Amino acid sequence: MKNVCWPYFDPEFDTLPERINGPTCRVCIDNESMEDCTIVKVDSLNKQGLLLEVVQILTDLNLSISKSYISCDAGWFMDVFHVKDENSHKLTDQKVINSIQQAIGTTKGPDNSAKTRSYADSLLKSDNSGEHTAIEMTGTDRPGLFSEISAALADLHCNVVEAHAWSHNARLACIAYISDQSTDSPIEDPHRLATIEEHLSTVLRAATAPLITSWAHTLQQEVKTSATITTNVERRLHQLLLSVKDYDWTSESISKRRKSNEEWRKITVRIESCDQKGYSIVSIECKDRPRLMFDTVCTLTDMQYVIFHASISSKGDNAFQEYFIRHVNGYALNSENDKQRVVKCLEAAIERRVCEGVRLELCANNRVGLLSDITRVLRENGLNVVRADIATQGEKAINAFYVKDISGKDVDMEMVESMKKEIGSIVLRVKNETSPPSTPQITRSRFSFSDMLKSQIERLSHNFIAIRH
């Protein structure tokens, strides 16, 4: 018998990068270099989806990213983020600074996504995924649909603990956490879950055949409990709307879009080729807003594109983003159809959060059927919910609705004031967002990553140098 010799692998080889370069993930918080923002520097071994995880952590902490430089090539992840708090100030809360370091620190390694999400969720105290039943719904939107869904759940003796709904291009995506009305526990009986699915499907089917799914990425009709949330809720809403192709516009919807939503005129997405390095360069110019970088990075990641380099900047009301991408198969965007699909999907991702209309913030003592009653009053007063964020904090229900007049006219504020009396003891705050913002002149950022690539792409280093402007 011939001797078979196998190559020897040093068991310490897997830890060689860490022993050479130090810890596999270094997070530096710099509060000295810039007067008006805090610089977050992340230096780590790279993995697929790491950029999205880091951006999600910063976004979930309600931090705005005003500028960023991304380099994720050659197996190393080197990112710089200029961030501000909710009041547009640099970070001064040491708890937030510690949270950034600890949360991003959990992203290192290929198997820590669940750990990262768990830590981020603990920071935000969002643990409904383990204590309640999660339901996902997608379908064709129509006036009053969210109210009908709320009423259906109330009829089924379900208590809505948390819910999020987005409407875009006549499509609706909704994620709701529900519990049993009498026990406030997850609903686990398969027969009852099947009844809930059938009832909700009937409500949605009035417009079109819906899709009700679990947290899994399949599009089968099913409702089930989930011990842990597997995807960030806002990312999942993006995925759900992407799955029903809300980026496809009919000639009729384009006409309505032009009349009712001026925001689309400020979105420009271009795709060019970087033949020297085999990248596709995606350039985005639009009105700046919170969570913009999360929405675009999330969309590119879910479309199976890898971001190797990026430059993000903002000036006044304007935002400029430039991404150097390839598909996970290693190829750049070659066909015109692929390019057009990426353009449409990014435009849709940017538009989904743009809610013209009036924002209503309601706070009340929580009770069974409260959401159904509130949405019924809105519907009966001719208001259509185009976006909703429902939450409970202890004994209080905290609801936020973006509403528009069903007829397409401006919301009658006198009617809203009279509605306050109708809903009784509920605290209602109104934030009018119907006034269109002034149209800014968008100018291209002076910094372009393509300029840097020409001369320095081969000179990557894991040591950050302070960037001064």
Image: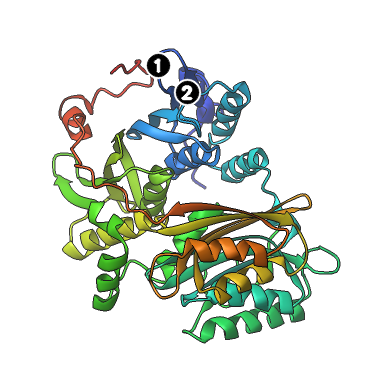
Q: Residue furthest right?
A: 183
Label 2: element kind: loop
Q: Residue furthest top?
A: 32
Three-letter amino acid code of the residue under disc 2: Lys
**Residue in the image at 25% along x and 66% along y:** 258
Q: Does 427 sit above or below residue 448?
A: below
Mark 2, Cα crowd under 10 Å, few <14 / some 14-19 / many 20+, is some
Instruction: Give x and y (percent) for residue 383.
Output: 51, 70
**Quadrant in the rendering for residue 399:** bottom right
**Residue in the image at 28% along x and 40% along y:** 318
7 vs 445, nearest the viewer = 445
Three-letter amino acid code of the residue under disc 1: Glu
Q: Are marks 1 and 2 in contact (CB under 8 Å)?
A: yes
If the image is split into quadrants, where does the C terminus sit?
Answer: top left
265 vs 63, nearest the viewer = 265
Q: Earlier in the sequence, mark 1 or mark 2?
A: 1
**Residue in the image at 35% along x and 35% along y:** 72
Q: Does 88 sit above or below residue 366?
A: above
Residue named by callout 2 = 90
Instruction: Give x and y (percent) for residue 445.
Output: 21, 33
**Quadrant in the rendering for residue 308:** top left
Instruction: Give x and y (percent) for residue 295.
Output: 41, 50
How has the structure been colored for display? rainbow
Instruction: Give x and y (percent) for residue 263.
Output: 30, 55
In this rendering, would 185 be left or right of 98? right
Q: Which mark is residue 35?
A: 1
